[in-house]
Amino acid sequence: MNRFDNPFHDLWVTEILAPDEFVKMFSPVVASHSEDLFGTGNVVIKGRQGSGKSMLLSLLNTKTRVAYARSGAKYPAPASYKSFISAGIHLIRDNARIVASRLSELPQEKRKDWAATTFADYVNYILIQDLIANIKYLAKEQTLDNVLKSELPINWTSQNQENLTKYIKTSSAWYGYLDDCNTFDDIEKKINNRITEYRKFFNFNNDHLASQVESTKTDIGEPTAVFADALRQSGVISPQTLVYLRIDQHEELYELEKSSGNSRIFRQVINRALAMRDGRVAYRVGTRHYAWSSDVTIWGSGAHLENMRDYSIIDIDEILRRHENPALGISFSDFAADVFSRRLAAYGFDIGSHKENLLKSIFGKTLTPAERARVYFKEKPSVLNIPDDWSSEWKKTLERLWLTDPLDAKLSEVWLRQKKQQREKVYLSKDMDAALSWKGRRYWIKERNEAALIQIAGDAKEMLIWSGERHILDLSGWNILAFMTICRAIWAAWLRSTPDEELQKTHLPSISMDKQVIGIYEASRIWAEKLREGADGDKRYAFINSLGAWISSTIRNDRALSYPGHTGFSIFKKDFDLPTPLTSLLKSCRDQGDLIESEHTTKSNDGLPRIKWYLNPLLCPYFRIPHIRTKEPIYTNLIELNEILAGNISNAKPKKIDDYEPPIQSELFQ
């Protein structure tokens, strides 16, 4: 092993991998629970950034399928899946944004219609161009070794090309654009020229869009459906072969609409394609939750798409989220473990007999709360805050307990500070055994362990310990990108601190706790910096920093830990539904994955519906907040949240990332 062997160095590698490498890296865990992906209808794949949407779509790519067939690896699709071929548009790489580049040159009243028709035509021709490329590629590969011939034969003969040309030209979908084409080569050339004309115009190389293009714009979805049907009728593909059309990075349209001032136009055009429910093609759309849920209106009609009728949904976040009933989802732990082992194997690590427990072999078990408290202790004098008026027996008992079990000592102090014990003046008692009744209350302890550790570490001026398999998985928050970010940072911390001679002798590392603490803090800092990215970045950054400071201070200052669940907050649902700048910001933070939202069953007598939020788990180390959610969150309202955002609450002063100082390894565990 050398100093540059970090298998998680490139977090996005699965999107740009060569097909042969994709087969090695791709984890089939999510695909095994996404049967609709290989069905006949339209499918929308939703998830947060880094959830694996693009990986699922890449599974449909023809080059990926060829690589699977030649490798001998099992293609991760249901045994009964039908023959299909796919084409796609990647809305970022194919630069769909440039469609709006010249809208300002048009009169205001013409912009929306022009943008919609131009975008529809541009998407149509990009998809057709890619479908042609996929057909020709597979036909060429099948001449070499008959790859996929048994399930997806491509009959790219001269006669079939003539038939294909005839069937294409008989359709009115092209509005005369292909009338002068005599061969399929002519058709392909005109399709490529049209896309070139668009790009020359959008990039200001031409003053006007070519008149032949401007006057023959096509309806969204119709040319692709005609082309797919012509492939079947001409015998190029079998009549039973499905044609999937992939649209990846759909959320780019949401951002484009916001930046160009053309609200919802581009997404509504895609919605129109799905609304056709055309059996000749089926769409596969990869998007983030906010970009899909905020508008399912159909361009030109005002009607709305209907879930389970116009499309079905694969919600990756929901699949991976922990469920009380395991049948409702899959284990994120299994998914992460599979991704982890595949990464290491692809980089040449000999995982051998460690494969079943690879995460634990490398990162070890997460320390129990009591064990972490002992690490913070380090034979230091007690940091318990014992009031002067407590009995000498209590003081001696707590000091003695601190030496053997600092967490028990802290929880004893916490218990004595709570209202009932204060009212009954238990702190004056001399009967210690009777007074330590809290030790039999298992849930009371479980609810307060993490918050107590936050206070112990803070009072002892020690860094919080996040390490081991369980912490790494929990901090990932069911998101594979977050998991790999943590793994990359830990691996980098280990590589930096390990001498070359030791690296050369290491075949599979066992990374110590101190390296993991450094790596996890670094990953958390990176995640905090990412708050500035995407929609409303600066506002989200300011809000989350203020929230983080507020929650962290609330936990530290609750010396009786009467409210150990105050690691999140809750407001009335009716308030959240109000159209205010703050609720828009809350939604933006939720949509970008900064906040995790869920329904809240209130304990208040009013019984009114509430919604609660918690920070993304990976932000917890940075803000020194427990990542485990227990008990009731903070009951707040929009007025208080506005005050927090404005910095008018003393314990909500935001932490500046620029002031962050990474832990120095030698200072962690002396």
Image (cartoon, helix red, strand yellow):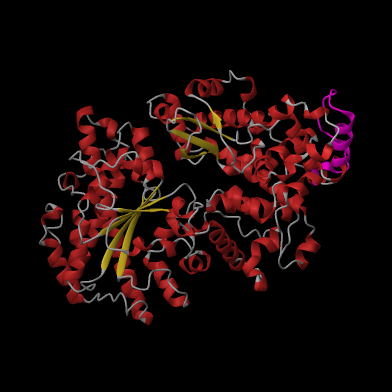
Q: Nearer the viewer, residue 130 or 430?
A: 430
Q: Is residue 371 above or below residue 353?
A: above
Q: Residue at x 17, y 66 (%)?
A: 230
**Quarter of image, res 391:** top right
Residue 338 location (% of width, % of height): 56, 64
Q: Is residue 471 left or right of residue 101?
A: right
Residue 483 location (% of width, % of height): 58, 52
Q: Is residue 398 magenta?
A: yes
Q: Is residue 668 left or right of residue 330?
A: right
Q: Which residues are magenta?
A: 375-401
Q: Is residue 356 above or below residue 446?
A: below
**If the image is split into quadrants, where does the N terminus sit?**
bottom right
Q: Is residue 167 left or right of residue 241?
A: left
Q: Is residue 599 above or below residue 390?
A: below
Would you say residue 363 is visible in this rendering? yes
Q: Is residue 156 left or right of residue 581?
A: left
Would you say residue 209 is visible in this rendering? no
Residue 423 location (% of width, % of height): 72, 24
Q: Is residue 382 above or below residue 153?
A: above
**Quarter of image, res 469:** bottom right
Residue at far top of view? 648
**Quarter of image, res 343:** bottom right
Q: Is residue 608 magenta?
A: no
Q: Nearer the viewer, residue 568 or 170?
A: 568
Residue 37 location (% of width, % of height): 35, 61
Q: Nearer the viewer, residue 556 or 87?
A: 556
